[in-house]
Structure formats: C-alpha cells, structure tokens
Image: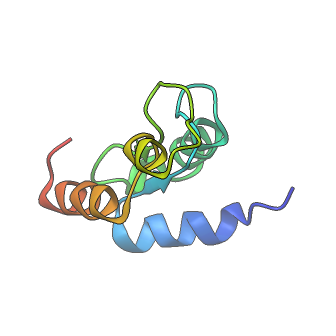
Amino acid sequence: MPLDIETVEASVRKTGRALIVTEAPCFGSIASEVAASISERAFEWLDQPVRRLGAKHAPIAHSPALFEAVIPQAADIVVACRSLVAGSS
C-alpha cells in the first residue's frame, strides 16, 4: 500500500482539515477511499468535513482546452483550499 496514511493522519491532526485532489472523478475513486480512511482514523480532529476535488463527470478530451475544463486546475485548488480554511463546505 503506497499511501502513508499515518503522515496524512498527522497532518489532519495538525491542521484540522483535509483536501484531496485527483484528476479522476471523485465518485468511486481513490480520493473516496482516502477520504474514508481519514474519516475513520482522524474524525475527532477534523474541524471541517474532508473535501474532495476531482474531474468533472464528463469524458476526458484530447483537446488541451477541453482537458483543462474537465481536470481541476491550480485556481480550482486555491478556491477549494480557501473555502476549507474559511469554514464553508
């Protein structure tokens, strides 16, 4: 198992938050499994629900413009992080 869940758990204990970013759609993805693991192992330290940010539920295109429209971009991650820190879900 390549995921070091102990390090992730330590981070959640320190920050009280978790944002999981993936290029895959969140439903049924590894992001869902990581979120479940965090919830099981560090629930009492979470100040906010675990957030997941993934690709839109759409086919992945080969066109760079369409690809960027589906996959989370840096600006999307910044917005998600800021909302997590601000306390909104």
Q: Residue at x 35, y 65 (%)?
A: 74
Is residue 59 or residue 88 the one in the foreground?
A: 59
Q: Residue at x 87, y 55 (%)?
A: 1
Q: Position of residue 36 (x, y in %)?
A: 58, 38
54 on left or right of 8: left
Residue at the front extreme? Answer: 63
The image quadrant that residue 77 belongs to is bottom left
Residue at the right extreme? Answer: 1
Is residue 85 or residue 28 the one in the foreground?
A: 28
As drawn, 13 above or below 46: below
The image quadrant that residue 78 belongs to is bottom left
Q: Residue at x 63, y 26 (%)?
A: 28
As drawn, 6 above or below 31: below
Colour scheme employed for the rendering of this structure: rainbow
Is residue 26 or residue 64 the one in the foreground?
A: 64
Q: Position of residue 48 (x, y in %)?
A: 28, 49
Q: Position of residue 16 (x, y in %)?
A: 35, 62
56 on left or right of 32: left
Q: Position of residue 19 (x, y in %)?
A: 41, 55
Counting labels gives 0
Which quarter of the rendered picture does the C terminus lie within?
A: top left
Is residue 49 or residue 55 the one in the foreground?
A: 55
As drawn, 17 above or below 40: below
39 on left or right of 37: left
